[in-house]
């Protein structure tokens, strides 16, 4: 009787403007421990959320091309702003390459809300995009969705220093603005924001639920690459790349993922 052939290896490319996409990478690695991951943080150009549409598209196309050329079989755009502003040009350019983006979890938040009020925390770039406007038109219905821009928050998280750039002051302000909406569901519309979820919960209280879509992204990737489910965990690997200085990415990857290998420089 012939042996069952081993499942083909899976190489998944993941990118974000910086370290925020590690929150999505964490969910991907839990779902597919046997896959090979290449994560590229475009930290030299972070954050995307306060850049123009043309700048975000140019950087996203360059980073995606680099991961494509590195052999990634599927791309995860682990950045809400890049998804909002660049995923359509990416899919047009790479029509035969599976590309998965991240979007604010408005639909599950609306389904879970008892009061019909949902707040969305995101970068100015995401909230100003036509893609987000279309998301609201398609899903909001009669509920109230309160879009709350959070300028500076991604940059403060990106620094990796809890005291940097007035992080506590930013979270205090966000807490007050969310409470003023009366929302009982808060959508984390930037992949950086799950890393300050504890600080947000302290300010919002147990009656407010935070909604993150990282697990939904992982499920979508598994749907597109079902063989990743069958890979033995020992075959899995992760290589970090960055366009900026590597120490912040290395430090945060160790803190958030338990990953201790050095990050390599990349120049897409």
Image (cartoon, rainbow, N blue to C red):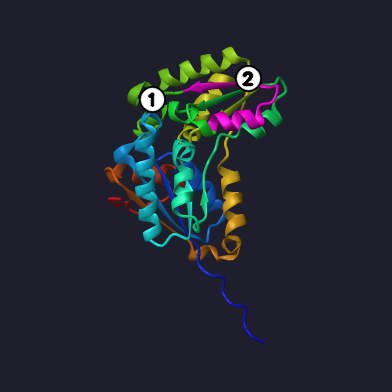
Q: Is 91 above or below relative to 2? A: above
Mark 1 and mark 2 residues within 8 Å of each other at the beta carbon:
no
Q: Secondary structure at mark 2?
A: loop
**Left or right for 60, reference 9:** left
Which region of the structure is painted magenta? 132-149
Disc 2 target residue = 183
Q: Position of residue 125 (x, y in %)?
A: 43, 29
Q: Quadrant of residue 205?
A: top right
Q: Secondary structure at mark 1?
A: loop
Residue at 62 percent of width and 28 percent of height:
137
Disc 1 target residue = 152
Whether residue 210 is visible: no
Q: Quadrant of residue 166?
A: top left
Q: Is 201 above or below relative to 247? A: above
Q: Is 201 above or below relative to 36? A: above
Quadrant where the image shows the N terminus: bottom right
Out of 214 and 76, give the one closest to the viewer.
Answer: 76
Q: Position of residue 154 (x, y in %)?
A: 41, 30
Residue at 35 percent of width and 25 percent of height:
163
Seen from this angle, which residue lies furthest top?
A: 180
Seen from this angle, which residue lies furthest front?
A: 92
């Amino acid at each position: 009787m012939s042996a069952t052939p081993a499942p083909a290896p899976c190489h998944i490319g993941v990118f974000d403007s910086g370290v925020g996409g590690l929150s999505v990478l964490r969910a991907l690695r839990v779902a597919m421990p046997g896959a090979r991951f290449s994560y590229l943080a475009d930290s030299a150009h972070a954050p995307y959320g306060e850049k123009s549409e043309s700048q975000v598209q140019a950087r996203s196309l360059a980073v995606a091309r680099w991961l494509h050329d590195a052999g990634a079989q599927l791309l995860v755009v682990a950045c809400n702003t890049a998804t909002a502003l660049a995923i359509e040009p990416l899919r047009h350019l790479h029509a035969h390459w599976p590309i998965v983006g991240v979007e604010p979890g408005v639909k599950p938040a609306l389904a879970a809300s008892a009061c019909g009020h949902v707040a969305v925390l995101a970068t100015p770039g995401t909230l100003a995009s036509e893609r987000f406007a279309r998301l609201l038109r398609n899903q909001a219905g009669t509920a109230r969705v309160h879009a709350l821009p959070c300028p500076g928050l991604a940059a403060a998280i990106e620094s990796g220093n809890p005291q940097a750039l007035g992080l506590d002051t930013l979270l205090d302000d966000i807490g007050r603005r969310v409470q003023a909406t009366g929302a009982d569901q808060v959508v984390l519309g930037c992949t950086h924001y799950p890393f300050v979820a504890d600080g947000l919960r302290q300010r919002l209280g147990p009656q407010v639920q935070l909604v993150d879509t990282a697990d939904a992204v992982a499920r979508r990737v598994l749907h597109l690459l079902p063989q990743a489910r069958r890979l033995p965990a020992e075959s899995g690997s992760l290589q970090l790349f960055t366009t900026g200085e590597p120490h912040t990415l290395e430090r945060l990857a160790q803190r958030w993922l338990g990953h201790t290998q050095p990050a390599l420089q990349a120049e897409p």
